[in-house]
Image: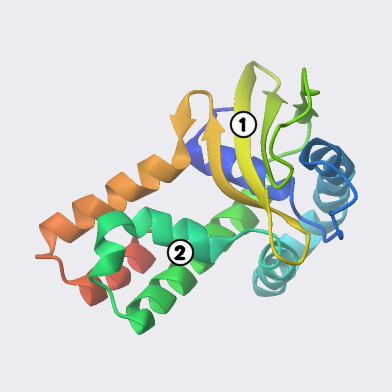
Amino acid sequence: MKFSIKNSLFICIGLLSSQFILSQVSAHEYAERIHNNIIEIIQTKNQLFLEDPDLFTKEISNAFAPIVDFERISRNVMGKYSKLATDLQQEEFSRAFENSLLDTYASTLVEFKDEKINVIPPKKPSKISDKARVNIEIVTSSDTYTGRYTMYLDAAGKWKIINIEINGMNLGKIFRNQFYSLMEKNDEDINLVIQKWVSSF
């Protein structure tokens, strides 16, 4: 199976597809618990995707949205331009960013059947209790890829992902470069860039 940014995004967010109160477990333990949920989704939701794609996407969205800090990620993607955006524009881009990724994950979900995702145990405890970097291996039918998530504990004591690195690709930086490119090509018109971001996914 050809490995792509879309695939890596799905895998990493898929690891975080159920809610736990996480103040009592480490980020690594959390990721290990969630792996079984990926298998369950793949086995039980493929037919729903074929029969009712909208409902499938909604179920995936309901699972992912509370877990990933889309607002923080989207603000990092906007980078220096977030200072030029109004609160409304930041909210609109955050929503557009979230919807575009969730739609991508939903359509990609059915492609994953035989892959495995292994969490690499940490060699030593993290010195910072509310932040963690979780190393993983993504094993496909043809190759093995390394990855890492940057995670933090939010105020509610839940681990959330704020960046993903897969096979040397920093996805946060890749999306930021895409946003910057759109801003430069569209005279820094944030409203227009948001529209084009939606249409590009």
- The location of residue 37, given as percent across then percent down, is 86, 49
Q: Secondary structure at mark 2?
A: helix
User: Which quadrant: the C terminus?
Assistant: bottom left
Q: Is residue 155 visible?
A: yes
Q: Is residue 107 left or right of residue 86?
A: right
Q: Residue at x 14, y 66 (%)?
A: 188
User: Amino acid under label 2?
Assistant: Phe
Q: Is residue 124 above or below residue 148?
A: above
* In this rendering, position of residue 200 left or right of residue 91: left
Cα separation, mark 2 vs mark 1, equals: 21 Å
Q: Residues within 10 Å of mark 1 (few under 14, many from 20)?
A: many
Q: Amino acid at mark 1?
A: Arg
Image quadrant where residue 23 sits: bottom right
Residue for badge 2: 97
User: Where's the N terminus, which quadrant?
Assistant: top right
Name the quadrant containing residue 91: bottom left
Q: Position of residue 137 (x, y in %)?
A: 70, 23
Specify the label residue 148 is tagged with.
1
Mark 1 and mark 2 in contact (Cβ < 8 Å)? no
Residue under the image location 61 percent in, 28 percent down: 147
Q: Position of residue 44 (x, y in %)?
A: 87, 55
Q: Secondary structure at mark 1?
A: strand
Say which residue appears at 9% left-offset and 65% top-offset: 187
Q: If you read the primary sequence from the N terminus, does the residue marked by circle 2 or circle 1 appear first?
A: 2
* Residue at 55 percent of width and 40 percent of height: 164
Q: Residue furthest left?
A: 187
Q: Which mark is residue 55?
A: none
Badge nearest the viewer, 2 or 1: 1
Q: Quadrant of residue 197?
A: bottom left
Relative to the observer, which residue lies in front, 109 or 89? 89
